[in-house]
Amino acid sequence: MVKKQIELNHTKHLIRALHRFKGKRLGVVGDLMVDTYVWGTSTRLSPEAPAPVLLVQKNISLPGGAANVASNIASLGGRVTLLGVLGRDEAGKLLRFELKKRSIDCAGIVEDSGRPTTQKTRIVVKMKQLMRIDNETDAHIDRTVENKLISSLSKHMREWDAVVISDYAKGLFTKRVAEHIVALAKKYKKPLIADLKPKNASLFKGVSIILPNHKEASAIAGTRSVLQAGQVIQKKLNCTVLITQGAKGMTLFHEEENAYFPARALKIFDVTGAGDTVTAVMALSLALGLSFREAAFLSNEAAGIVVKKQGTATVSAWKLERKLRTYA
């Protein structure tokens, strides 16, 4: 009875914390994308080639990558300043429009006419993805764009309650940009939450927490074992580690302890963007001063909500609260 009362009180504590997400100021620095979905039917082959003909029923474009992290933070009540680079093209205009609809501050976004806005187009028939078409470059940004991003970081870092790095290895995170982010976060004592691709992980030693999935953790650590990978990354990057494992849940490695959180979704429909949701909830939680274990618990619950939806999705504070209340 005592244990149940403690768990009940803790759940209430986390529900109160969700209400405090509102108004927290976060900076998100990362690779901006447009996630486009084209749904249709296919009942015949083209007379021009042995390929199916898609009859389009509807299509939709949503913020993806770092822009989806920002969208999740905004959906949870946070105030977001987004830093990244867009091409001077229609996809870039579309993404700015979608971000402004979500009240996301785009002042830190730099336009570069020499590169395209990253756009991933998914073709879906009968709820199954048949193909993905990527329009992108992974070339590093030039010195001019670097300077503009670093200037924005220097201007805004002290205003933020936490900072997110959302890396999809599309060329934004040069060594110089990474060094400035880490140095400024340490200078102003800001939690630094990093979702990194393995090729850039070494640039971010000393972040507060890194959030790789199992495949990424294996690439960074050189082992398939979740337990060993978490411990290796902890020592290698001198940070807390949360390894997401899809249908198997997630495992937190903090100091000398690790904690396992089983997946909360009984049926996983689509994992697209789930990592972005985990990153957003983790960042807001640490901005509030919650423990890593509490932040991981909330992140796991949020992931259990978005994987039930098709396509890139966000989670709201009230949906997360409703889920927590089932434990109260």
Image (cartoon, rainbow, N blue to C red):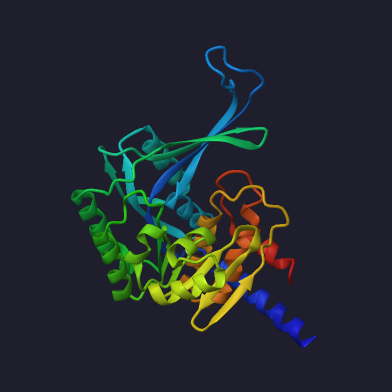
Q: Which quarter of the picture shows residue 137?
A: top left
Q: Which quarter of the picture shows residue 225?
A: bottom right
Relative to 140, is 156 above or below? below
> What is the x, y in percent for residue 96?
39, 42
Extreme residue toward the top, this view: 47
Extreme residue toward the front, this view: 223
Q: Which residue shows up at 24% across the image and 61% down it?
A: 176
Relative to 299, is 274 above or below? above
Q: Is residue 28 left or right of residue 295?
A: left
> What is the x, y in percent for residue 261?
64, 70
Of residues 202 and 82, which is closer to you in this image? 202
Q: Is residue 27 left or right of residue 250?
A: left
Q: Which residue shows up at 66% across the image and 37% down it?
A: 127
> What is the x, y in percent for residue 135?
40, 36
Of residues 305 and 210, which is closer to you in this image? 210
Q: Which residue shows up at 55% across the image and 69% down it?
A: 226
> What is the x, y in percent for residue 107?
32, 51
Of residues 105 and 148, which is closer to you in this image? 148
Q: Assign the C terminus to one quadrant of the image.
A: bottom right
